[in-house]
């Protein structure tokens, strides 16, 4: 099948020696020719104005697989155009683990099953999965945080960041968006800050050389901009080699049940492709050798998380603690889920020959329960469904993960979701493709493998930022959660107010209702507790030895950023204070002062005629999607009076400035 003229798919290449792979990629038609000789032949064929044998091989293979429509009219076509399509096909063939022949074979099977209406969970009965529900501030939460911090030195992290912000109304990459606008810290910077803060705590506990790795999955849409963002910001403080970027590729679109590939409408020598889904992250981690490398380094746990959920690290230490305490091979971080809520559910599925715990999409759950003879997805004694809501935040035990990836070549089960035009399910409304989801990894495991969940309050671990203002308004009316840029920012401040409240400080957790971009939000004290300040609730409590001396009004703005800051007194009804301190700068805050504060300035007006918002022409997109800008009420010189930066170790005290 894999002659010297046709590059093999990725799965086969990985098994080859470098010498074998090199000779096959050169594409020489005579075995044993050197790379130089192969290139000379290629140049000769080019000069004769014909396709190379490599190019002819991929064309003939696809003709044999029922894709002859791709090459209609080739007799009169320009050679350069033919080469473009042949090159694209060859690349796609090498990128998919089973090659394009495998892709077509898999597609036909899944399309047939879709047409027949096959139930992927036929024969399974759902049960409540094994797991633990934690509440921020209770004893169980504190215990799990403590356990989690003991294993932090043996962790790794992976961001799934393949999407642009178009759905948000933003044309850049989502990880460059500000998490909040008091400090303008972007999401990628925030995540790096969290990982570095955890790394510092691990070093303080004795792991002096601890470096916590971060993998970032990009796509063709986000790769270059992500690389540029990191380069422009010196990797946000991360060491050289600490970040690994793995790029996701696309797969061919499918026009019909015969898995016919689709040519671009504007270019008949270019194949239409679509994303394969975030499940590719497992294949990319496997191909990069990361899981095996981390396992050899003795690392225990890998946490996957999404690109714009800024709250996730508030739950990370406790979630690691649950994985460690309960021996989970896979641990899904979840939130309580209302029966019928449109979010995937974590279920334990019991079958005749197999038991597995995995995500079941909300539109599959009702049918699964009906087939099992249950009345439906009903609330238990907690008032929520017994099947918690999936967030696509996953913690894997690295040794078992690496072993499983070796067996499956990093491929998780695929699915296809065509939208049909006709009742017979023979015509698609638009081309589809094979997809895979990262949360379907547990389907690869055996019945004895321990898979479970940890559940947190939504307000402390999940606030997605993914909807534009119009869609967010509709989502809020339907579910109560707009999942927009402005709601994400308000949730960022609210969790910090909640943490201060649990420390015993006097601060209103719930804010007053205000609308931005017609979205209802809660606006209270703008509190920013940067990751370096505290990684856990227990650590934060230690920073406030006299919590009764901390009183913040709803118009207060406070930024605390540094591992050695202690707050003896902090009283602001309306005003601003920012303290940034490097490690070793031991800062004591003794502050009671009002003054000018940071306020939201509403931007944009709703236009009924156009059904859209109208903003000032010079307003940046990152503010348009919020519906406001952040404004300091005083001058720049006034603001400087309330900002303290300590970039050298030492002992410092912050007190109210004398007039």
Image (cartoon, helix red, strand yellow):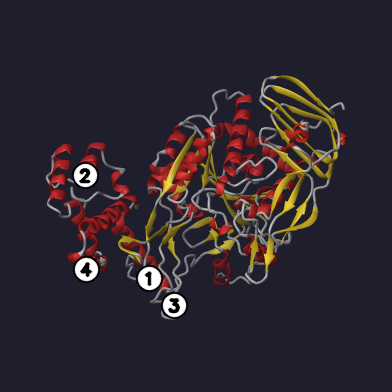
546 vs 272: above or below? above
Which residue is under mark 2?
Answer: 24
Q: Is residue 130 left or right of residue 421?
A: right
Reading the chain from its start, which is encountered first: label 1 or label 2?
A: 2
Reading the chain from its start, which is encountered first: label 3 or label 1?
A: 1
Measured as percent of width and height from the top left, residue 323 is found at 59, 42
Pick the quarter of the image with the C terminus: top right
Q: Is residue 638 left or right of residue 149?
A: right
Cα gap from disc 1 to disc 2, whole angstroms: 35 Å
Tell me the element at label 1: helix
Which residue is under mark 3?
Answer: 421
Count of labels in the image: 4
Reading the chain from its start, which is encountered first: label 3 or label 4?
A: 4
Q: Any mark on residue 73, and which?
A: 4
Which residue is under mark 1?
Answer: 112
- Who is closer to the viewer here, 281 or 245? 245
Report if the CB atoms under discs 4 and 1 are less than 8 Å apart.
no
Please give the name of the residue rendered at 77% of the width and 51% of the height, measured from the top-left corner: 523
């Amino acid at each position: 099948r894999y002659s010297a003229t046709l590059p093999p798919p990725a799965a086969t290449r990985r098994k080859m020696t470098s010498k074998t792979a090199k000779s096959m990629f050169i594409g020489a038609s005579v075995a044993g020719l050197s790379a130089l000789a192969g290139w000379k032949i290629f140049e000769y064929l080019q000069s004769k104005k014909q396709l190379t044998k490599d190019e002819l091989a991929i064309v003939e293979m696809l003709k044999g697989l029922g894709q002859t429509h791709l090459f209609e009219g080739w007799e009169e076509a320009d050679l350069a155009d033919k080469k473009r399509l042949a090159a694209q096909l060859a690349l796609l063939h090498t990128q998919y683990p089973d090659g394009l022949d495998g892709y077509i074979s898999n597609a036909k099977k899944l399309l047939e099953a879709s047409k027949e209406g096959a139930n992927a969970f036929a024969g399974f009965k759902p049960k409540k999965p094994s797991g633990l529900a934690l509440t921020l501030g209770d004893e169980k939460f504190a215990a799990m945080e403590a356990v989690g911090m003991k294993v932090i030195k043996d962790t790794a992290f992976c961001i799934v960041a393949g999407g642009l912000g178009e759905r948000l109304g933003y044309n850049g990459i989502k990880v460059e968006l500000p998490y909040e606008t008091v400090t303008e810290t972007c999401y990628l910077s925030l995540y790096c800050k969290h990982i570095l803060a955890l790394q510092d705590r691990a070093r303080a506990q004795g792991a002096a050389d601890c470096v916590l790795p971060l993998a970032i999955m990009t796509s063709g849409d986000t790769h270059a901009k992500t690389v540029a963002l990191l380069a422009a910001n010196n990797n946000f403080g991360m060491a050289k080699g600490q970040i690994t970027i793995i790029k996701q590729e696309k797969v061919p679109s499918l026009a019909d049940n015969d898995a016919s590939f689709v040519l671009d409408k504007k270019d008949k020598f270019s194949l239409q492709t679509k994303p394969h889904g975030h499940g590719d992250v497992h294949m990319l981690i496997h191909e990069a050798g990361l899981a095996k490398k981390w396992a050899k380094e003795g690392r225990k746990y890998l946490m996957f998380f999404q690109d714009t959920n800024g709250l996730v690290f508030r739950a990370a230490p406790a979630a690691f603690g649950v994985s460690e305490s309960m021996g989970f091979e896979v641990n899904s971080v979840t939130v309580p889920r209302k029966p019928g809520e449109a979010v995937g559910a974590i279920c334990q599925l019991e079958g005749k020959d197999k038991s597995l715990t995995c995500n079941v999409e909300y539109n599959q759950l009702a049918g699964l329960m009906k087939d099992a003879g249950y009345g439906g997805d009903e609330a238990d004694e907690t008032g929520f469904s017994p099947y918690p809501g999936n967030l696509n935040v996953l913690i894997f035990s690295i040794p078992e993960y690496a072993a499983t990836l070796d067996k499956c070549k990093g491929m998780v089960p695929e699915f296809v979701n065509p939208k049909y035009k006709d009742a017979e399910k023979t015509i698609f409304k638009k081309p589809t493709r094979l997809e895979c989801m990262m949360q379907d990894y547990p389907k690869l495991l055996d019945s004895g493998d321990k898979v479970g969940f940890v559940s947190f309050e939504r307000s402390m671990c999940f606030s997605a930022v993914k909807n534009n203002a119009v869609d967010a308004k509709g989502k809020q009316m339907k579910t109560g959660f707009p999942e927009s840029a402005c709601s994400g920012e308000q949730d960022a401040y609210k969790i910090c107010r909640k943490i201060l409240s649990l420390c015993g400080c006097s601060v209103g957790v719930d804010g007053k209702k205000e609308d931005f971009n017609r979205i209802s939000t809660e606006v209270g004290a703008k509190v920013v507790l940067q990751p370096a300040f505290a990684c856990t609730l227990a650590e934060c409590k230690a920073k406030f030895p006299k919590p009764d001396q901390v009183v913040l009004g709803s118009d207060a703005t406070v930024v605390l950023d540094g591992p050695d800051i202690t707050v003896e007194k902090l009283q602001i009804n309306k005003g601003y204070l920012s303290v940034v301190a490097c490690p070793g700068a031991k800062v004591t805050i003794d502050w009671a002062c009002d003054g000018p504060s940071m306020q939201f300035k509403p931007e944009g007006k709703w236009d009924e005629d156009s059904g859209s918002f109208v903003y000032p022409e010079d307003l940046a997109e990152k503010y348009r999607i919020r519906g406001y800008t952040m404004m300091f009420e005083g001058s720049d010189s006034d603001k400087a009076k309330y900002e303290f930066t300590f970039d050298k170790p030492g002992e410092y005290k912050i007190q109210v400035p004398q007039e």
